[in-house]
Image (cartoon, rainbow, N blue to C red):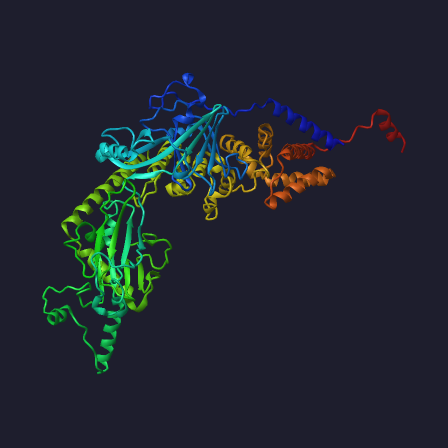
Amino acid sequence: MALRKNLARAASATAQNCVIAARADMLLATSASHGDGAMPHARARPSMWREQFDYYWDGRRRLAIGWFEGAERAAVRPELTVISARDERFTNAPTLIDVISAARWRARIIVVDVPPEHRFIRLTAADGAELILALSAERELPQGGDWRLLLTLLPDAGGADPVAFRLAAFPARGDVERLSREQTAAAGARLVWAIGQRRVVDRADNAVVIRLAPARRIFPAYQSRLVLEAAPFESSAAADAREAPFAIMEHWLREPGAPRIILRLRIPDSIEESATLLGRCSVALAMNQRRRLKGWTLEQRSAGEPAVDPLTFDDLRQATGDPHEHPDAAETAEPVVVGNLLALLVDPEEAEVDGIALRRSREKAAPGMGETAEIEFYGAALGDDVGLVCPAAGPGDLGIAPVDPGGPAFARLFRVEGDGLAPRRATDDEGLLDDLMRRATDAARAATSAAARAVAERAAGLKGRRDKFVASLNGALARAEVAARFEPPGLWDALEPLAQASFTALVIGETGPARARLQQLGGYGAFCADPALAAGIAEGGEFAQSARLSVETAPARGAPSLLARYLDACGAQGMAPAGVDATQEARLMRALLKEPDVAALREARVALAIDDGGRREAAKAARFIVDAAAVERARAHFTEAGAMDAADMLDAYLDLRRAGGWAPPHEAPTLAALVARAGVELDVARLEAESRAQAPPAQERSKGLFAAMRGLFGR
């Protein structure tokens, strides 16, 4: 009974403390002038941010939110809860993907990742204002809307910012391609990158829905790979009525004309942007009949057996009596022919290759749509291999459409068959690949025409702009005494400059411990893998002090919510209660970022409470049960004192804690009260024992006068 009364008193006191505690989830005030001429907050409507921000989607998983020079300035820096779902009603797999604090807007750009197959995103401010982003393909957007062109620029001389972004918006019904070209041309040598995106804004009853198409890279052209596609054999004679080479296949002569062996090459980049890759690639023709004949001839001669010598062009010209005879065949006696691809594209006359002809499309492609060329292998015959070889190619640099056969990254080949060109998975067959690689390397060294050099110089200029962009960001990091640095630029995604600028501002604006956490986490690589999680860890304080990104958490970016990923990274997996919805997860995430006592909950293995008052009460109580040894002493004390209810409760908590479980938050105050009571009782017992030990021994009492006289005379 005494135990129950004590527990009731503790619960009553805790409830009173809970009533006293006030909820502190309020919108943080931000500076009215953030260096960008924003209007005073008193004059700004809280919901103005919905259309003053710009939103760029890369068509896959990444979304960038920000405001840029050239657009109406956003006066409000709202705290936002960002939730995604598969359907527009947000009933199918709603997932928390970010909670954006007011302080994070100092970066001007927020980068978040969207789970796979999620095409609807809801942004909710603290005042209840909402914005829905609907992500869809270009063809699915309604007519109209506006075109948003975003230019990434090198900073002005003496400018305070390391980089600059400029927005140009115009109606999508206009000639957006021409207007985009005018904007990029006007930007001059400062222009590093440009992306464009069409959006449609729907407004009804104070609800705003912005429909976004994928952002398309405008300058330089789309950064994609070289793709080969086989052209079908022509069933009728071509205009030039080509003949079969030397009648080596008699059935071809009975056809209206010899099939023309043509590959279509798609270069989605501009020639200048692709110059580095194109300069290392070679068009290849492997005449397998000649290869086998050459091998057989060598074997015959080494064995002393009869051999044959193939006819040459000189033999044919002598036989026909025409010194200008030039059949459609490779004149060389070599069985393998290669030619540098860049040289063929920019200077086909000087870079003529025996048995191969390349023609560029005469139609001017729109910005960002690249270029198409036809490669005709007029010297190829049945059974030969044709294609591209690039010794320096990485995975995905070369491809075949519509289905890539795979194989080594540095070669993509087709086999000439009776009914067309068949993609072939390249292997080390009879040393062919080694021969092709050696010849391609030699061809790349020999490609020194003036036109090729000019294109390479222009390509170096474009890359130099990106080098300067990265150097400017690294300079800003160095001035802020931040150890993180960007690597030299490689291949960029559409939103790469935005992500780099966002990371730079995030790191510079954080405190020393937060910077150290980001660096320990993996720097920009960790930010790219999961930007919302990296930002949360930077803001997380003591709770995120020892955060780690495991190999398992990075691929799971699209599956669990931000709260689950954050708890997992901070060593608190399972700390959140089961069954909470995305909105409740956002409340818990903000509590983890703002409330300093949540670290004690983790150390004491006490679960999070959704209710703010209950969670804060549990956090205060957790400080008294963090020390497992103190809890064990309290359990032993109650066991010895015979208070088995209290001992059993503490024993169950210790067992749960050893098993890696989480105690319910409502039990934390009771557990803390028991540990405190045991501590008081143990202290009282200790003081009493010390007092008894220090007291002097009791003296014998005097017997009095009459007792003494009786003792004297009674003998």
Q: How many marks?
A: 0
Q: Nearer the viewer, residue 458 or 688?
A: 458
Name the residue at 14% across, 70% down.
Answer: 316
On screen, residue 14 above or below 382: above
Residue lying at the far right of the rendered structure:
714
Task: Classify residue 38 by image quadrant.
Answer: top left
Name the residue at 47% across, 40% down.
Answer: 118
Residue lying at the far top of the rendered structure:
43
Q: Nearer the viewer, residue 340 or 105?
A: 340
In the rendered structure, the answer to whether residue 258 lies left or right of residue 662 reads left
Residue 569, image x, y percentages: 49, 42
Residue 9, image x, y percentages: 69, 27
Q: Nearer the viewer, residue 615 or 242?
A: 242
Split into 4 quadrants, where in the image is the C terminus? Answer: top right
Task: Classify residue 164 by image quadrant.
Answer: top left
Name the residue at 87% across, 31% down.
Answer: 711
Task: Classify residue 441 by image quadrant.
Answer: bottom left
Residue 217, image x, y percentages: 32, 39
Q: Is residue 391 visible?
A: no
In the rendered structure, the answer to whether residue 128 lies left or right of residue 676 reads left
Q: Is residue 221 visible?
A: yes
Residue 575, image x, y percentages: 56, 39
Q: Nearer the viewer, residue 671 or 566?
A: 566
In the rendered structure, the answer to whether residue 166 lies left or right of residue 556 reads left
Name the residue at 45% across, 23% down.
Answer: 47
Split into 4 quadrants, where in the image is the N terminus? Answer: top right
